[in-house]
Amino acid sequence: MRLGVNIDHIATLRQARRGRRPDPIEAAQVCERAGAHQIVCHVREDRRHIQETDVRRLKRTLRIPLNLEMSIAPEMVRLALAVRPNSATLVPERRQELTTEGGLDVSRLAGRLRRIVPAFAQAGIAVSLFIDPDPRQVRVAHELGVPSIELHTGRYAQANSTRAQARELRVLAQAATLGHQLGLVIAAGHGVDYDNAAPLARIAQIEELNIGFSIVSRAVFVGIDQAVREMLALVRRHGA
Ligand code: PXP
């Protein structure tokens, strides 16, 4: 099981004062030393946290892969093709949302994705599609020829009863199994924390968890090095 650490909220804190600290690149380097397998960041249309210069600095300095989360807006596509992160996770984006609220409707957007996916592949950027754990979306993602998908775990993370959580976990396991059978690499993320990560780590077909908010929140008390190490230990204890 690989752990991707999303550092957006280090930049959220920096942007609160529009200064230089805390520096998300410095944080990413600590995550790297703590054993994270990749760094994830999201340049949003409103630039509320990560800035374009952050992405360029991350690409220059990181030794582990950089996964750029991005919408499919033309300016983001141009940025990705210029910076060439190791991978790009295509997500839906709405200006008013606090965070990404659902998966990308790859079925509806198939026409645009058919143009973007090959352009990225040609630039050496592996594309992942952030989708709801819905068999139809998984099949369309496969048809689009991407190497991997990331399953949106938000409904699982927000389930307000044990029963609802077990149901959402089954939905995720089924989507992961289908994707795996189709030959896709399966990642998952959104709302994953120290209390709900273990059952996800036990789904054998999920190879990667991408986690941001809970790790940065924990870092406020124990530091980001320790917060990453704790999450790594947890997913290793429960995962393959
Ligand atoms: N994966 C994707 C595709 C996301 O959009 C996000 C949120 O930016 C995450 C993972 C991380 O979610 P969280 O911050 O809730 O851990």
Image (tube, rainbow, N blue to C red):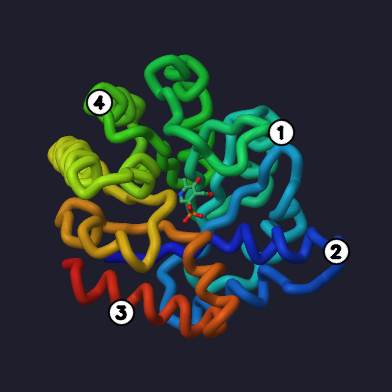
Q: Secondary structure at mark 1?
A: helix
Q: Nearer the viewer, residue 101 or 128?
A: 101
* Circle 4 crowding by C-alpha within 10 Å: few under 14, some 14–19, many from 20: some
Residue at the location (45% across, 29% down)? Answer: 104
Q: Which mark, by number, is residue 75? A: 1
Q: Earlier in the sequence, mark 1 or mark 4?
A: 1
Q: Earlier in the sequence, mark 4 or mark 3?
A: 4
Label 3 sits on residue: 233
Q: Secondary structure at mark 2?
A: helix
In front: label 4 or label 2: 2
Q: Which mark, by number, is residue 139? A: 4
Label 2 sits on residue: 17
Outermost residue, front direction?
A: 161
In three-dimensional space, the C-alpha distance between marks 3 and 2, rounded to whole angstroms, equals 34 Å
Three-letter residue code for mark 2: Arg
In front: label 4 or label 3: 3
- In percent of width and height, residue 122 lies at 50, 39
